[in-house]
């Protein structure tokens, strides 16, 4: 097997910037959200932001498994994550979903981890699609939003709740917050 050495091994490649870890929670009303938030905090550290709860009415895709009504919430964590951690984060989220499932295995919560970056928002997915590059370990990167002209912009495949004005305004505010944090800590890497 041939070993891979980028640039002939003599050039240092820039390190990718750390990302803000966020989660999108989709949950049934019979779920103890406090328990889920406690489990997430135990795994990924302090929750920095917990967005408002709103009814999830963009699709009925999850109703057969999770019931109805369903609710959506976005949250972020204080500790930044390396971008290559996305597959590990997704598998840990799936493990937590199982922990809170109903008897018989039907989920009561869908935990979608993702990375908020200065130029994009990326979700982890187990479902292949043309716009989802494979990361390994059964996980794909879903490019969900791009930052352009001063705001995150939806793409043709962006889920409707992320593409909504409310969703994008939350992510724009989180980007601004993280940008300020990086500036204050004089972080290196891509300029936020």
Image (spheres, helix red, strand yellow):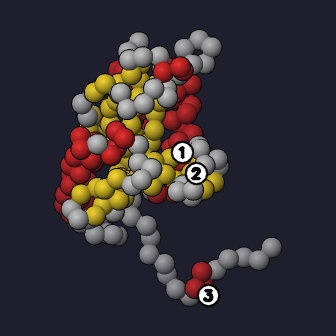
Name the residue that disc number 3 marks.
Answer: 8
- What quarter of the picture does the N terminus occupy? bottom right
Local crowd size for mark 1, using a 10 Å CA cut-off: few (<14), some (14–19), many (≥20): many
Q: Quarter holding the C terminus? A: bottom left
Number of labelled discs? 3
Q: Residue at x 33, y 46 (%)?
A: 163
Q: Can residue 143 be seen in this view?
A: yes
- x and y, in percent, of residue 94 in the image: 55, 33
Q: Where on the picture, by quarter, is residue 71?
A: top left
Tell whether label 1 touches label 2 (CB within 8 Å): yes
Drawn side of residue 137 relative to residue 146, left or right: right
Label 3: element kind: helix
Q: Which of these two is toward me, 40 or 124?
A: 124
Q: Earlier in the sequence, mark 1 or mark 3?
A: 3
Mark 2, secondary structure of its residue: loop
* Direction from residue 160 to residue 168 in the image, left or right: left
Query: Looking at the picture, does residue 106 appear above or below residue 72?
Result: above
Measure the alpha-carbon separation of dots 1 and 3: 34 Å
In the image, what residue occupies the spot 54% across and 55% down? 132
- Cα separation, mark 2 vs mark 3, equals 33 Å
Q: Is residue 46 visible?
A: no
User: Measured from the top left, where is residue 98 in percent x and y?
Assistant: 56, 25
Q: Residue at x 50, y 47 (%)?
A: 124
Whole-percent x, y for residue 187 in the image: 29, 65
Q: Earlier in the sequence, mark 2 or mark 3?
A: 3
**Circle number at residue 129:** 2
| Residue hosting label 1 | 125
Tell me if mark 2 has few (under 14), some (14-19) or many (20+) residues whose alpha carbon lies within 10 angstroms of its own.
few
């Amino acid at each position: 097997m041939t070993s891979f050495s980028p640039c002939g091994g003599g050039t240092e490649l820039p390190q990718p910037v750390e990302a803000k870890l966020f989660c999108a929670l989709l949950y049934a009303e019979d779920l103890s959200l406090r328990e889920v938030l406690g489990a997430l905090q135990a795994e990924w550290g302090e929750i920095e932001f917990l967005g408002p709860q709103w009814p999830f009415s963009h699709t009925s895709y999850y109703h057969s498994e999770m019931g109805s009504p369903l609710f959506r919430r976005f949250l972020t964590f204080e500790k930044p994550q390396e971008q290559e951690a996305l597959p590990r984060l997704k598998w840990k989220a799936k493990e937590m979903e199982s922990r809170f499932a109903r008897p018989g295995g039907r989920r009561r919560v869908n935990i979608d981890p993702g990375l908020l970056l200065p130029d994009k928002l990326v979700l982890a997915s187990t479902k292949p699609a043309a716009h989802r590059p494979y990361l390994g370990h059964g996980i794909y990167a879903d490019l969900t939003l791009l930052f352009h002209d001063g705001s995150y912009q939806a793409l043709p495949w962006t889920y409707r709740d992320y593409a909504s004005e409310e969703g994008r305004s939350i992510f724009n505010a989180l980007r601004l917050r993280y940008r300020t944090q990086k500036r204050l800590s004089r972080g290196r890497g891509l300029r936020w």
